Amino acid sequence: MMNREIAEKIAEELNITDEDLEKRKHFLRIEEEDIRRIAAFKNIIKKVPASMFDGFYNHLMAYDETRYFFKDDETIQELKGKQMKYFEELLSGNYDREYLLSRLSVGYVHVQINIVPLWYIGAYNKYIEELRNVIGKFDGIIDENKTMQSILKVINLDIILTLESYHYTKYKLQEELKKMVVTDELTGVFNRRKLEEVMQFEIERAVRNKNPLSMLMLDIDHFKRVNDKFGHEIGDRVLKELTEVINRNLRETDYFIRFGGEEFIVFLPNTPLNFAKDIAERIRRTVENHTFDTAGRVTISIGVAEYHKTDNRDTFLERSDEKMYEAKNSGRNRICW
């Protein structure tokens, strides 16, 4: 069954408008005469014969990789029914937006159940072979070669749309997996896996371009009290809400990383110490003035450091960490640099 919402989203992301669909049909030379030939063939056969798919499924059952999908005869019969419905759509002559969405939906489903393009194209090769046999039975009533040529044009459109959707979905899935690897599950900001990558990239860029680079190390004051008083579930909600508050005070070029527990790091590319201090103070003040839904008021201590040419990654981290502890030891709810 077509997931219309997902198909519409894919069409939007790939920028396949109704006008673009018409351009694709024109590029593949799907003309009115082709649609008339296909409609004439459909009128003659009335219904796609179920036997047309027997050879196709026998072919798939011969391979270990594809046999997995056909565990019992009931599954095969259900899939045959879906294939018959598809070929009725193929021969309908209505290659409009609904048809487009159905093809995009197929590409999406193929990624979800791990049907690779090799099997998909292989399926069409077998379909075409079987379809030629069916069309050949009506030679003399219809032009066998021209009818087959017209159907192949639509099949090419199907393959193009389905593969575009497949590769788009595959790409988005891979991007999502990459994001999951470097994203803190609770707060949605980067995790420590991302830290090494960011530090190496930003330090090398700062040195190469002779640009300033600053770092904030921040920690929630008395966070243990929050967990002890309200419970860890409320503590997690405070962490999530805190990251949302801080994110609103960061730029798109900044990196926000959960360092561990209630400690966070903010990388500020192209930012000298005096500007970093201003950003840190704005964050500190915003958090102090924010009323958290369940825990009331929460404060943070922030250490600020600017990268020096004598630094390496460890010393840069250590200096910001030292300043953060200096802020905590000198009264909390403040910044030190």
Image (spheres, rainbow, N blue to C red):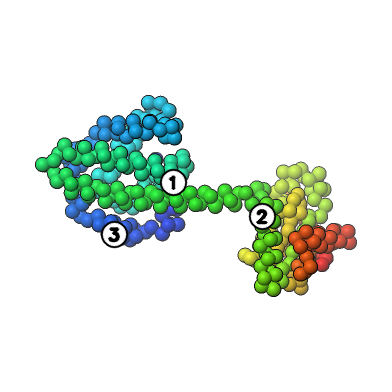
**Rendered location of residue 278, percent (x, y):** 75, 70
Mark 1 surroundings: few (<14), some (14-19) or many (≥20) residues within 10 A: many
Are the residues flagged by discs 3 and 2 in contact, CB closer than 8 Å? no
Mark 3 surroundings: few (<14), some (14-19) or many (≥20) residues within 10 A: few
Residue at figure coordinates x 37%, y 26% from the top left: 73
Residue extending furthest toward the top: 73
Residue at which label 1 appears? 108
Residue type for callout 3: Phe
Residue at which label 2 appears? 194
In this rendered view, identify the residue nearer to me: 94 or 79.
79
Q: Which mark is residue 27?
A: 3
In this rendered view, identify the residue nearer to me: 333 or 22.
22
Residue type for callout 1: Tyr
In the rendered view of the protein, which quadrant contains the C terminus? bottom right
Residue type for callout 2: Lys
Q: CA distance from mark 1 to mark 2?
A: 29 Å
